[in-house]
Amino acid sequence: MIEVVNPATEEVIGTLAEGTPADVDAAVAAAVRAFPAWAETSVDERAKAVRAIIDGLKERAGEFAAAMTREMGTPLTFSQKVQVANPVAIAEGVADVLEGGYFEPEEIGNSLVFREPVGVVAAITPWNFPLQQMVAKVVPALAAGNTVVLKPSELAPHTADLLAEIVTAATPAGVFQLVHGTGAVVGEALAAHPDVDMVSFTGSTKAGRRVSAVAAETVKRVALELGGKSACVVLDDADFGRAVKIAVANSFMNNGQACSAWTRLLVPAERHDEAVELAAQAAKKYTPADPAEPSTRIGPAVSKAQRDRVVGYIRKGVEEGATLAAGGPEAPLPQGFYVAPTVFGGVTPEMTIAQEEIFGPVLSVMPYADEDDAVRIANSTIYGLAGAVFSADTERALRVARRLRTGQVDINAAAFNTSAPFGGYRQSGNGREFGRFGLDEFCEVKSVQR
């Protein structure tokens, strides 16, 4: 049995039976049996199933928000406004594409080009945005006519159980299967399984490398959404105060546990000290507190291990010569896996905290000499998931955004778009999620010549 712990109280709030390879075999076998009939259902029928899932998400929004706050410590208001709202919007985007003629065959010369389902999809999802990442995989996979075996994070099992109830009610028997357990056992078995046609994985880059290696033995399709070390580039003509404030908020969102967080704040060298002071002042507004309280802006790390990992990076930053401007390694509260919201100044590109994904509320302020230098620093990690550019000149900001080797860039804090492609360059993964681009991942393309 796996214990489920509330990270804010350190109390055990449930137990979970750990899945085995035999459980994976049974789930995959059921998905294999269900695949032919589900693949042959009409687009209209699959669209109705997606709409039923959307209705279920909306009806049980309060349960989902409470579960995520309880299981992984995300502040309740963030759970409601983002952790539940985004998945609903993602699913609606898929339904719109599905109903908009996506599966109509395309004529190219004497060929008809069809989109067909891949087969049995294994979806392996993380704990930090549990509902969002489950929906971003399960819904488009089912919409495309695939059957799905979901392995959610063992740190957020109740969220997965709630979703499973909704999806199971909306689809025929066997089309959707849920197997709880660890990545080392259940995830490994799914990636290696000869009857799994595709693995869609979100998690750490280290785990993604392992999924790729195991899946390669059966040459199955692999989609990966992995880590990030995203840069927020503030150009010299930007509204400086606004840019720094927004960068801090982005870096600390979801308790700093977001793969797309702008954890590196790049500023003109002559304004570095000003940026550090502004960031430190902004960080003071993020007081660690009970995530179940609606006014809380930052809660705990998801687990003791994660808290200790983040604290280790903070200590490493101090050891390597970065200037601690806010926060630090000391626990801000006597109970719970809390980390003090931390701001470093004087961070250089070779430092560990500038290169490795910390996954906690830690922001590194980094000086640059000119625009070319800013781009060089932004592109100087193994990652390429997200990023930001602030400038009074939107055309200039766009030119810089195009030079960033990353899958998504926000200009002047533009709104998150759940229908635009989301995914990474380099070791942030491959493949894209959301909208039409998310459906593309779960389809084979067949050409028939006449």
Image: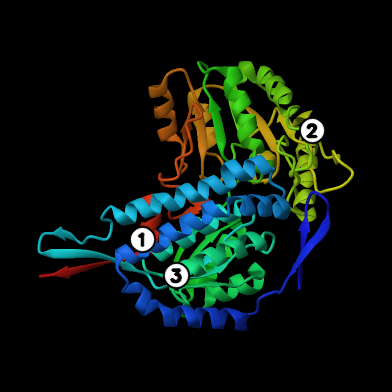
Mark 2 Cα shell of 10 Å, populated few (<14), some (14-19), many (≥20): many
The mark nearer the N terminus, 3 or 1, is 1
- Cβ atoms at labels 2 and 3 below 8 Å apart: no
Q: Position of residue 371 (x, y in %)?
A: 49, 24
- Amino acid beneath label 1: Ala
- Disc number placed over residue 355 in the picture, else none: none
The residue under label 1 is: 47
Q: Is residue 333 above or below residue 191?
A: above
Residue sitting at 68 percent across and 43 percent down? 76
User: Number of marks in the image?
Assistant: 3
Which quadrant is the C terminus positioned in? bottom left
Q: Is residue 93 above or below residue 326?
A: below
Residue sitting at the far right: 334
Q: Judging from the image, what secondary structure is the residue with disc 3 in?
A: loop
Q: Is residue 171 visible?
A: yes
Query: Residue 299 falls in which quadrant of the image?
Result: top right
User: Pointer 3: residues within 10 angstroms few (<14), some, or many (20+)?
Assistant: many
Q: Is residue 272 left or right of residue 419?
A: right
Q: On the rendered image, what quadrant is the N terminus found in?
A: bottom right
Residue 171's label in the rendered image is 3
In the image: residue 441, left or right of residue 77: left
Q: Is residue 394 left or right of residue 200?
A: left
Q: Earlier in the sequence, mark 2 or mark 3?
A: 3
Tell me where residue 169 appears, x and y as whole percent: 50, 68
Inter-mark Cα distance, 2 to 3? 48 Å
Q: Amino acid at mark 2?
A: Gly
Answer yes or no: do the residues labelled 3 and 1 have beta carbons within 8 Å? no
